[in-house]
Image: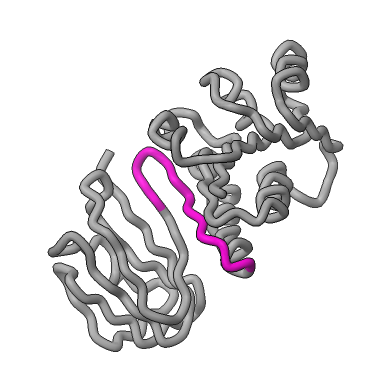
Amino acid sequence: MKVGIIAGGPEDLLPDLSAYVNDIDVWIGADRGAVVLLEKGLPIDYAIGDFDSIADPQRKSLETKAKVFRKYPSEKNETDLELAIIQAIELQPQSVYLFGATGGRLDHTLVNLQILLRFAEHDMDAAVVDRLNIVTLAQHGTHTIQNDRQYPYISFIPMTPTVTGLTLNNFYYPLTDQTITFGSTLCVSNKLTANCGTFSIDKGIVLIIKSRDA
């Protein structure tokens, strides 16, 4: 099973969601993200949030068209996106796509990227996707990475104070047993030199950001 979650980030940063329709089995709209599903005619399997900024006609449409509609108080400990993520984890999917989780408020963007750790704790693949970026997370071990012409640049950003033993093969700028730390720009804006490459980590956690220019 693959789950797609739409959060309430700026709509102009969303990728072409139609490209994911045949790949996603369950759609979850987090607050205004549910309105995006409604407006784009996509399935609304779950609509979750406080919906305090949603106009009454839209909210009533969501209540009617969503298979599951869950309204929470506006004052709560979790963000609407976190509530959607809790629901996604309960479904035990193979992988999860997060859309609308970047842009706008910087505090939201930063915490939404850190939320990838939640899925890693449950051994689930997850990606934050917007119009210019695909962000995933990797821990120790050797991993294969595919070349994507739509997102040609690849950066490795430490999510722990230190990442040791980072090795990159089939990259324009290869590395062998490198240590990177918070604030390092060594692994920003690399590229693959083949259809696929590998990277390995001895210890630590990194964000892998595939990106393209605007």
How many labels sit on residues?
0
Query: Can you give x and y, in whole percent of width and height, for residue 79 in the image?
Result: 72, 46
Query: Can you give x and y, in whole percent of width and height, for residue 2 in the image?
Result: 54, 47
Q: Which residue lies furthest to the top in this view?
A: 57
Locate residue 118: give its quadrant.
bottom right
Q: How is the structure coloured here?
A: one colour
The residue nearer to you, when weighing 136 against 214, is 136
The residue nearer to you, when weighing 155 against 127, is 127
Locate residue 14: give its quadrant.
top left
| Residue 178 can be seen, yes or no | yes
Question: Is residue 168 one of those drawn in magenta?
Answer: no
Q: Name the residue: 63% across, 66% down.
A: 122
Locate residue 15: give its quadrant.
top left
Q: Name the residue: 27% across, 59% down.
A: 146
Query: Can you give x and y, in whole percent of width and height, for residue 86 in the image?
Result: 72, 52
The residue nearer to you, when weighing 62 against 188, is 62
Q: Is residue 60 left or right of residue 24?
A: right
| Residue 7 can be seen, yes or no | no
Q: In this view, does 56 lie to the left or right of 113?
A: right
Above or below, 203 relative to 190: below
Query: Over which residues does the magenta segment extend?
Result: 122-134
Above or below, 202 relative to 184: below
Tell me the quarter of the image containing the C terminus: top left
Q: Name the residue: 47% across, 53% down.
A: 127
Query: Can you give x and y, in whole percent of width and height, for residue 132 in the image?
Result: 34, 43
Above or below, 47 relative to 58: below
Q: Name the residue: 23% across, 80% down.
A: 175
